[in-house]
Image (cartoon, rainbow, N blue to C red):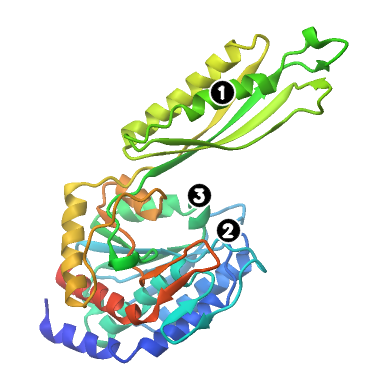
Amino acid sequence: MAAHALEHALAYLTPRREEMAELLHALVEINSHTENIAGVQAVGQRLADGLGEVGALSVALRRHDPADRFAPHLVATTAAPGARTLLIGHLDTVFPPGAFEGYRSDGTHAFGPGVLDMKGGLVVAVFALRALEAAGALAALPLALIAVSDEEVGSPTSQPLLRALAAAPGATRALVLESGRPGDLVVTRRKGTGSVTATARGRAAHAGNAHAEGKNAIWALARFVDAAQKLTDYKLGITVNVGRIEGGQGKNTVPDHALALVDFRFVTNQDAQATLEALHAAAAAAAASVPGTSIDVEGRVLRAALERTEPGVALYRAYAACARAAGLGDGEAPLQGGGSDANTVSAVGVPAIDGLGPRGTGYHTRDEQIELETLVPKAEALVRFLLSAS
């Protein structure tokens, strides 16, 4: 590590807590629910404007959605060749306009939608890059910052962009600045996610006059639901959840249609395919048990699992040393049930660690908050890592 560059970068960061809080305040005040395209784009533009002042970066807002369902994604890169580090975050939040608004601080904690998930992590990345620029070190570091606009709905348009950047020559590691965990635990494992829709069809009939002529789609679907739920295996980390069902017309009509929405999660990518195949088999068996009905299953794996691998553990340990030096915790988090963009890049073969944003609690709730005192140390840990990895 270039000692003089680190010294100058840390000298830049040390007095920046209030500036970091001010940027966080400005970002949180912009509602950026995924479907609020103007709001998400405004957050991306605010960051792009700030990063545009960093001379070593080439900054752009890129749209990867021909249907314009989502805002553009933010990409900022240096031109330096070599082993590239990917810094990954997202611009969107889960809160629709009016559901949870505004920024508030009591001096030690900041509260508001996205303050933890994950505008705080974006602020950490911005100031780390500014510190490296101030130290004259950024131009020599091969890295890319990607902040996507659709992460909270599974990154449907940004996954191809993330995979392309991860598969590009030189990409060797990814740091994801998602919500920081209590104790600063670093995420090395996340479950993968999948989703299917099961649509049952039968034959409608009057429930009193022609009951025998009906083919009850709800009955078939109920048998599918029972079989699907039984695929859950907590020892293997596989969960299947039928979260919504609908169908039928009224109690006096044999229903000719019914639908179920299913979420499934898994620890290994081998189990992902096995679970998907088991859901199809369950649908076939359920339909066969109610003659005259059929059940179609449509869906796929949405995010591969972030599996714990030797390269991933090595990356975690390298970052953990930098976190310790910055006065942070350095433990490894237990398996996380939710997926993130770390899953996407790891599936391409790039080791990834996650949860590197400021420490906090309550993401996806109205109690969302961060500890303001962790803003500067988290940026310092990132600076230390980027300099040590160069």
Which numbered marker is on residue 310? none
Does the CB distance between marks 3 and 2 fall below 8 Å? yes
Residue under the point 38% across and 35% down:
238
What crowding class fits label 1: few (fewer than 14 Cα within 10 Å), some (14-19), or many (20 or more)? many
Badge 1 marks a residue whose secondary structure is helix
Q: Quadrant of the N terminus?
A: bottom left
Type of amino acid at the residue the image marks with label 2 = Phe
Q: Quadrant of the C terminus?
A: bottom left
Image-based side of 373 in relation to 22, left or right? left
Q: Residue 183 in the image: state x and y as whole percent.
A: 29, 67
Q: Residue 329 in the image: state x and y as whole percent.
A: 23, 69
Badge 2 marks a residue whose secondary structure is loop
Badge 3 marks a residue whose secondary structure is loop
Residue under the point 34% across and 89% down:
16
Q: Is residue 80 above or below residue 25?
A: above
Type of amino acid at the residue the image marks with label 3 = Pro
What is the CA distance from the residue labelled 3 to the residue labelled 1? 28 Å
Q: Is residue 155 above or below residue 327?
A: above
Q: Which residue is mark 1?
A: 224
